[in-house]
Image (tube, rainbow, N blue to C red):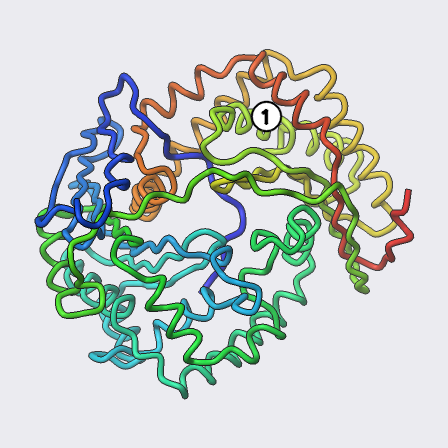
């Protein structure tokens, strides 16, 4: 099982454009009484750069999206639940991640061994991950084995038994995972930075929870979280590869029949709203003293949410600043001065907030110089902006990374689910590329001037104390 941290380039939108994609965000709004009594299917796109995308809303409110790609011999199948670590209360911290582990431990039809062995017997793979805003369970198999994958994955998500003995066994596994994470300062510093910006808000907490919250968590608490949160309107099923949409819908309905997800008619849940905006803490410095050979630092500030129209300009700005080997920070800090092996910038975006930050890993004695150069470069871009040549390169990186990322069924499946779950809509590939092309130099420089002038928080993991960064 894995945990996701940083979000990818935006793949969704709100509203519709000249591309002719079907808008369906409004369909999430009707009350239960207005929910359809039968499945409703629409074709969302027939993209020349992809396959035919179809969407079916089942009477229960569960949504099924597929992308048919006949040239592929595999299929990626995922079940996405609009529940993440930010949906937990303080004492529940880690419940979503704990549950993710437990759903693989057995159902009323299958043991844990049978869940894994049935997929592995046909050469497939299965896994899951929890983020701050959603949880995903997925399998990748040969196209002929898709019925098996659907049956197994729907079974474990809909009808897990959560045996008391399994709760205790997996508690130990998760505590080991937390300990392992604490031994990875390059990961730990990202969680420290989130806490510096968000404080006690759920976005500032560890996805895994802590030893203090996981140790006393009971089976009853996890079971309650499971049944209250894993409801049909909150779930999106997505699949991409050599498949037939109608067959996938039929198989999903068969697999869910008689389970807790086979419920009365309901409307799909609305995607997570962007308001009210999350309140962030004033800029601060957090230091985790640790005797490491390398210091890990993150300097950054609150960013923009994922539906902000400036997200395309932010993607370009991020590429120019620290998105690759040709970026300003990489060239200045690593190539020209040799101060760090790893240095990059990144943007994380949520429904109602976001982060923009620069990470560097360097020798402890070089931290001051690395931070000085980073601050100077951010101030330079805020004051003077980027050049036309950098704009063109930043656009090319954004478009290339997105299109190349569609070369496998897993990324296509994820794109379908994220568009539906996070945006309530799916932006066609051509429209997304056009939105990147439409970014102007003034768009990027205006955003840079506003974003990079914000007070910066600092997170550090290494052989230091708070007083080392008092200035």
Residue 238 in the image: state x and y as whole percent: 26, 49
Q: Is residue 387 left or right of residue 373?
A: left
Say which residue appears at 38% left-offset and 42% top-offset: 422
**Nearer to us in this view, 125 or 416:** 416
Q: Is residue 306 left or right of residue 75?
A: right
Q: Is residue 147 visible?
A: yes
Say which residue appears at 36% left-offset and 43% top-offset: 271
Rendered view: 329 above or below 380: below
Q: Which residue is mark 1?
A: 317
**Nearer to us in this view, 269 or 256:** 269
Residue 96 in the image: state x and y as whole percent: 45, 64
Q: Is residue 74 visible?
A: no
**Which class describes the residues within 10 Å of circle 1: few (<14), some (14-19), or many (20+)?**
many
Determine whether the residue tagged by mark 1 lies in a helix, strand or loop: helix
Rendered view: 396 above or below 160: above
Outermost residue on the bottom side: it is 165
Q: How many marks?
A: 1
Q: Quadrant of the rendered structure where residue 387 is?
A: top right
Quadrant housing the N terminus: bottom left
Quadrant housing the C terminus: top right
Residue 281 in the image: state x and y as whole percent: 70, 44
Q: Quadrant of the rendered structure where residue 224 is?
A: bottom left
Rendered view: 351 above or below 161: above
Rendered view: 144 above or below 47: below
Q: Quadrant of the rendered structure where residue 54 is?
A: top left
Residue 351 in the image: state x and y as whole percent: 47, 41
């Amino acid at each position: 099982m894995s945990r996701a941290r940083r979000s990818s380039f935006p793949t969704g939108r709100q509203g519709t454009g000249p591309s002719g994609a079907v808008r369906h965000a409004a369909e999430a709004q009707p009350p239960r009484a207005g929910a359809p009594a039968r499945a409703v299917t629409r074709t969302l796109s027939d993209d020349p750069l992809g396959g035919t995308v179809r969407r079916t809303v089942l009477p229960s409110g569960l949504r099924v999206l597929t992308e048919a790609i006949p040239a592929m011999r595999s299929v990626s199948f995922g079940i996405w639940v609009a529940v993440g670590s930010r949906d937990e209360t303080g004492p529940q911290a880690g419940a979503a991640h704990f549950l993710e582990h437990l759903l693989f431990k057995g159902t009323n039809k299958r043991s844990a061994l049978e869940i894994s062995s049935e997929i592995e017997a046909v050469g497939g793979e299965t896994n899951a991950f929890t983020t701050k805003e959603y949880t995903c369970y997925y399998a990748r198999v040969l196209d002929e084995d898709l019925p098996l994958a659907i049956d197994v994955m729907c079974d474990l998500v809909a009808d897990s038994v959560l045996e008391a003995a399994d709760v205790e066994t997996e508690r130990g596994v998760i505590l080991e995972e937390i300990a392992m994470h604490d031994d990875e300062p390059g990961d730990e510093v990202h969680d420290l930075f989130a806490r510096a910006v968000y404080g006690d808000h759920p976005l500032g907490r560890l996805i895994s929870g802590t030893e203090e919250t996981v140790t006393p968590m009971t089976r009853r608490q996890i079971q309650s979280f499971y049944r209250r949160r894993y409801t049909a309107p909150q779930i999106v099923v997505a699949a991409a590869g050599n498949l037939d949409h109608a067959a996938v819908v039929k198989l999903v309905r068969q697999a869910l029949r008689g389970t807790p997800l086979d419920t009365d008619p309901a409307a799909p849940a609305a995607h997570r709203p962007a308001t009210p905006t999350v309140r962030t803490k004033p800029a601060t410095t957090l230091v985790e003293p640790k005797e490491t050979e390398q210091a890990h630092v993150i300097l950054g500030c609150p960013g923009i949410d994922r539906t902000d129209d400036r997200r395309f300009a932010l993607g370009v700005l991020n590429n120019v600043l620290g998105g690759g080997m040709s970026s300003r920070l990489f060239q200045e800090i690593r190539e020209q001065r040799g101060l760090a092996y790893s240095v990059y910038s990144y943007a994380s975006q949520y429904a109602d907030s976001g982060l923009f930050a620069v990470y560097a890993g360097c020798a402890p004695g070089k931290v001051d110089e690395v931070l000085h150069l980073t601050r100077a470069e951010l101030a330079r871009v805020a004051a003077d902006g980027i050049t036309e040549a950098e704009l063109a390169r930043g656009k090319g990186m954004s478009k290339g990374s997105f299109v190349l990322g569609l070369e496998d069924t897993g990324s296509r499946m994820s794109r379908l689910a994220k568009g539906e779950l996070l945006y309530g809509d799916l932006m066609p590939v051509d429209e997304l590329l056009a939105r990147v092309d439409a970014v102007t130099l003034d768009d990027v420089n205006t955003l840079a001037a506003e974003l990079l002038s914000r007070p910066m928080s600092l997170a550090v993991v290494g052989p230091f104390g708070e007083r080392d960064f008092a200035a």
